[in-house]
Amino acid sequence: MLVLLMQSVNMHAFFRQKTVPDWVNTQLSDPDYFVGIGSAPIYKKQNTHVERARKDALNELASEISVQLFSSNVLVTLVRNDKIKDEFNSLIRSRVSTELDGYELVSTYADKKNYWVYYRLSKQKYYEQQQLKRQAAVQNAVSYFKLASDAEKNSDFKQALVNYAKTVDAVKLYLNENIVASIDNKEENLIVQSFARLNAILSSLKIEPLLPEIHVMSSGEINRDKLTFRLVDEKGKLVSGFPLLAHYSERAIQPANMVTNEKGEVQFSIGKIRSLNKEEVFRVMPDVNAILVESSADFVVRKAILDMSINTLSVPVHITKPSIRFVVKERNVGVDISDGMVGKTFTNLGKSGGYISENSREDYVCIVETDTKPQSFNNGIYTSLLTGNIVVTDNNKKIKYIAEITPVKGMQLSPEKAGIEAYNIFVQQINTRYFREIEEAILK
């Protein structure tokens, strides 16, 4: 009888353990705890259900913790770009999941197909932890704000920007709240003041050029002295140790980033001018991104600061093409041709390309000599062969281009007409080959 009674008790306990807990199928609500219940299917030969259920439960727990984003928060007035505002709001919301700790495992349950887990987090403990984290963040922000303010007073604008960015970054997860702290016995909203000072510094810095515009010839080089710029503050005081970024419209230059010296100056270099345009633009601006990278601020914080207005200087670069004087000697079967088609072709191409100057002084001289001579006579048709050479020299008599003309055949009823036919073919070659080669030679 005793054995049967004990067996009955054991069987009853066994079936009680297999009973599905109420929390598996019931939406729980607890005034003192945030609750998260997660589940995951159980797959044979896999052991992923525990971790997947845990993540599911913690996500549900986090969803119970709401972060209120008020339309009156500082982001509305300080950040102009709606996309950046949304990124800040996402960052603030992420605080719940990234800072979720102190939760406890209440229970687990499994049947043949699924696994459940039940977590909870004390609301009192959570809010106490959040308060401590917020206080620590504000303390860090206050330290950075004081460093920034001191640097600004000493005209160290680079470090001022770095530390104002760090101020915002320190409390970025709490931008939906009013972050007020005592600075020099005065209550200050750290975020509002940091954004205001960032804007004020960036708008006060001005770049001044040595030359308001630059004139240069294609294939020439601009002296570095002409690409000298200085940085001044709103009082006209020179700013040293500040990074500037340059951009040339034709192509990238190296180095494009320079730091102002003790005179507040930088010099850039373009190298040889290869542009065929009449004008390019050289732009210089404060290299704010380099400063923000040094601050190690979050990417969203950096984007908000980069969206602020800065003073950019644009200097036009006026480009003139070198002038070419063409000296052409044309002969057909040994007879001089005046005002021939070769001379006209080179002159017209030079004018249309901008290489013919009204000034008497030329940068290059292109000498072209051509002649034809009979080569053969067959079945009443004459063949004449055009030969010659092209030489281009600069003002120092240095040869920039030389070519022996590839012989050109012309066929007609007389040697003279065959020579004219050869000239017609050669003119086409001038258009498609020789003039282009001359351009490349003087512009490289």
Image (cartoon, helix red, strand yellow):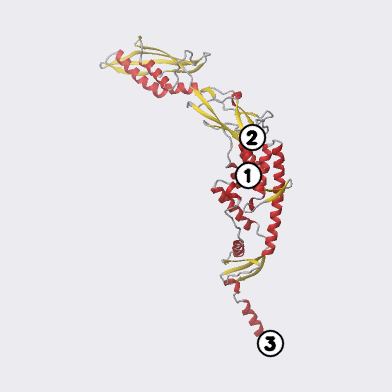
Cα distance between the residues tagged 2 and 3: 89 Å
**Image quadrant of residue 358?**
top left
Residue type, label 3: Val
Cα distance between the residues tagged 1 and 2: 20 Å
Label 3, on which residue?
A: 3
SS at mark 1? helix
Which label number is shown at residue 243?
A: 2
Residue type, label 1: Phe
Cα distance between the residues tagged 3 and 1: 81 Å
- x and y, in percent, of residue 169 in the image: 65, 48
The mark closer to the camera, 1 or 2, is 1
CB within 8 Å, label 2 to label 3: no
In the rendered view, would you say 390 is above or below 171? above
Looking at the image, which residue sits at the far top? 335
CB within 8 Å, label 1 to label 2: no
Label 1, on which residue?
A: 195
- x and y, in percent, of residue 365 in the image: 47, 14
Looking at the image, which residue sits at the far left? 380
